[in-house]
């Protein structure tokens, strides 16, 4: 499920690793000016096949109540059909039974008849070329509806494609067109998502928006962005460069990427219950030193010594450092890693005045919720922001799922969003006049068009 793929900790496992270097080598040889923006060579990757028998992305009125259904595709796993059940707040994947009947994968089972959508969503597929190479994205809209607000669904730190599950029909059925995209190196987009930093992602989105100008489905005076987790670093950059009407941040940090990764590592060490305070401090000192070497590209000899010592410590496996780590990294690898890891959002946030909604789970173990709020408030006070709303959900984790402790192992089964999410986003947008009424006289067949 798309909603479960937003953790940031994977970044640490990429630091100067041999496996990452091998994945990057084919693009590094291309000789582009920016390693992080170098497109992949050879045949472009293909989008994962979608089952043509699957029901249309849309909102369905079933005997059990209203359910939103949308495709997800995250290579290398098979495409899935994701649902959000409004009555129970459950989210998960569906399994086809017979005919138009689908059942939830998780018990207790819910069965849905997905014969005809109450609101069907149409997909227009696009591909453009920019500085970073081929970029694939889709505009999702309602047939015959024109000049509607548009929300760009940004992605977390993963290999997600444009098929972002139930959120697409959720926003579309509640009055907004939706733009989604293939992360670099997924779907039909060239490049490598592992080495794409916030500024690179913002540049891609801005290029996609500019390519759509003139499309009558969209009211370009009411365009906004939804940024979950890692996407929360991207949305403010877009708002700084492009006249966005709104920004929604979900579980986003207002600090540096490195500080956020350090917070995650510390939380995991604490949760293990295996280490003393001194051992945790030692682990964090090692990690911060390695990041300092990366930031300054200096003192790699001492980094090698520290790494040799760290390998003997019981906490080392939890640091997510790959076995083939080398110091220093190759020049192209260093450039790419710095682009994806070295980012401080504060100078950008101090220029953002776009109305912003920030959502957090009180039990978030991936982002420091209190620190995130303080950082946003301080930066927005300097920018002159007049409309900043924060909501912290009790008993919710990083994904705004109900949880006992906030750690992944303690999520409730079956998984459920905290009451109030995602409806709080539509309520907030409605208050700003940023939704359009959605009506559809009759169900329509699933439609996909493509431009190149």
Image: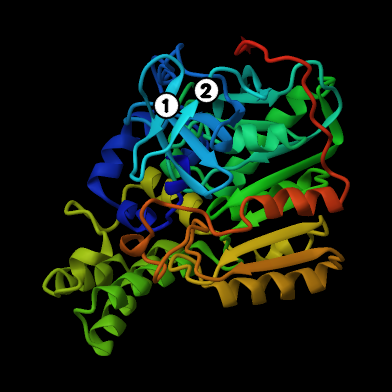
Quarter of the image with the N terminus is top left
Q: Are marks 2 and 1 in contact (CB under 8 Å)?
A: yes
Question: Where, by quadrant of the figure, is residue 353 drawn?
Answer: bottom right
Cα–Cα gap, marks 2 and 1: 7 Å
Residue 126 shows in this picture: yes
Q: Seen in the image, is 444 located left or right of residue 302?
A: right
Q: Is residue 23 above or below residue 11?
A: above
Image point (41%, 43%), residue name: 194
Q: Nearer the viewer, residue 435 or 161?
A: 435
Which type of secondary structure does the marked residue at label 2 adopt?
loop
Q: Nearer the viewer, residue 134 or 58?
A: 58
The image's mark for residue 37 is none
The image's mark for residue 114 is 2
Q: Seen in the image, is 56 located left or right of residue 349?
A: left
Image point (60%, 71%), residue name: 372
The x, y position of residue 289, in whole percent, is: 35, 73
Which type of secondary structure does the marked residue at label 1 adopt?
strand
- In the displayed orientation, state which residue is furthest to the front: 63
The x, y position of residue 102, in whole percent, is: 42, 26
| Category of crowding for the residue at label 2, using alpha-carbon neighbours closer than 10 angstroms: few (below 14), some (14–19), many (at least 20) | many
Count of picture labels: 2
The x, y position of residue 118, in whole percent, is: 67, 24
| Category of crowding for the residue at label 1, using alpha-carbon neighbours closer than 10 angstroms: few (below 14), some (14–19), many (at least 20) | many
Q: Nearer the viewer, residue 111 or 314?
A: 111
Image point (43%, 22%), residue name: 101
Q: Nearer the viewer, residue 19 or 82?
A: 82
Residue 236 shows in this picture: no
Question: Where, by quadrant of the figure, is residue 107 drawn?
Answer: top left
Q: Seen in the image, is 265 located left or right of residue 341?
A: left
Q: Which residue is mark 1?
A: 102
The x, y position of residue 218, in whole percent, is: 81, 27
Quarter of the image with the C terminus is top right
């Amino acid at each position: 499920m798309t909603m479960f793929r937003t953790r940031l900790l994977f970044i640490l496992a990429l630091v100067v690793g041999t496996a990452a270097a091998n994945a990057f080598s084919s693009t590094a040889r291309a000789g582009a000016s920016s390693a992080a923006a170098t497109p992949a060579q050879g045949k472009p990757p293909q989008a994962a096949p979608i089952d043509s028998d699957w029901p249309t992305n849309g909102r369905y009125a079933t005997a059990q109540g209203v359910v939103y259904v949308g495709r997800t595709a995250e290579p290398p796993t098979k495409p899935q059909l994701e649902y959000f059940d409004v009555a129970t707040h459950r989210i998960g994947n569906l399994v086809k039974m017979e005919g138009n009947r689908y059942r939830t994968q998780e018990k207790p089972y819910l069965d849905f008849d997905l014969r005809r959508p109450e609101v069907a969503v149409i997909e227009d597929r696009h591909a453009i070329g920019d500085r970073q190479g081929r970029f694939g994205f889709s505009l999702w809209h309602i047939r015959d509806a024109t000049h509607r607000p548009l929300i760009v669904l940004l992605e977390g730190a993963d290999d997600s494609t444009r098929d972002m599950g139930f959120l697409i029909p959720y926003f579309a059925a509640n009055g907004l067109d939706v733009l989604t995209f293939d992360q670099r190196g997924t779907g039909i987009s060239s490049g490598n998502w592992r080495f794409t930093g916030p500024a690179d992602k913002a540049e891609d989105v801005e290029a996609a928006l500019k390519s759509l100008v003139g499309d009558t489905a969209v009211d370009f005076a009411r365009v906004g962005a939804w940024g979950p987790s890692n996407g929360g670093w991207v949305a403010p950059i877009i708002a700084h460069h492009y006249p966005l009407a709104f920004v929604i941040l979900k579980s986003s940090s207002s600090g540096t990427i490195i500080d956020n990764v350090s917070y995650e590592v510390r939380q995991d060490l604490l949760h293990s219950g295996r280490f003393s305070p001194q051992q945790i401090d030692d682990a964090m000192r090692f990690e911060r030193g390695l990041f300092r070497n990366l930031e300054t590209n200096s003192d790699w000899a001492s980094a090698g010594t520290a790494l040799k010592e760290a390998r003997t410590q019981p906490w080392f496996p939890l640091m997510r450092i790959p076995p083939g780590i080398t110091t220093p990294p190759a020049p192209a690898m260093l450039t790419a890693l710095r682009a994806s890891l070295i980012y401080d959002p504060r100078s950008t946030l101090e220029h953002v005045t776009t109305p912003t909604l920030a959502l957090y789970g009180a039990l978030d173990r991936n982002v420091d919720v209190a620190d995130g709020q303080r950082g946003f408030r301080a930066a927005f006070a300097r920018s002159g922001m007049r409309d900043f709303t924060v909501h912290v959900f009790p008993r919710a984790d990083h994904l705004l799922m109900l949880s006992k402790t906030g750690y992944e192992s303690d999520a409730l089964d079956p998984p459920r969003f905290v009451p109030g999410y995602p409806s709080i986003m539509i309520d907030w947008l409605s208050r700003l006049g940023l939704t359009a009424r959605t009506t559809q006289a009759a169900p329509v067949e699933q439609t996909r068009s493509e431009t190149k």
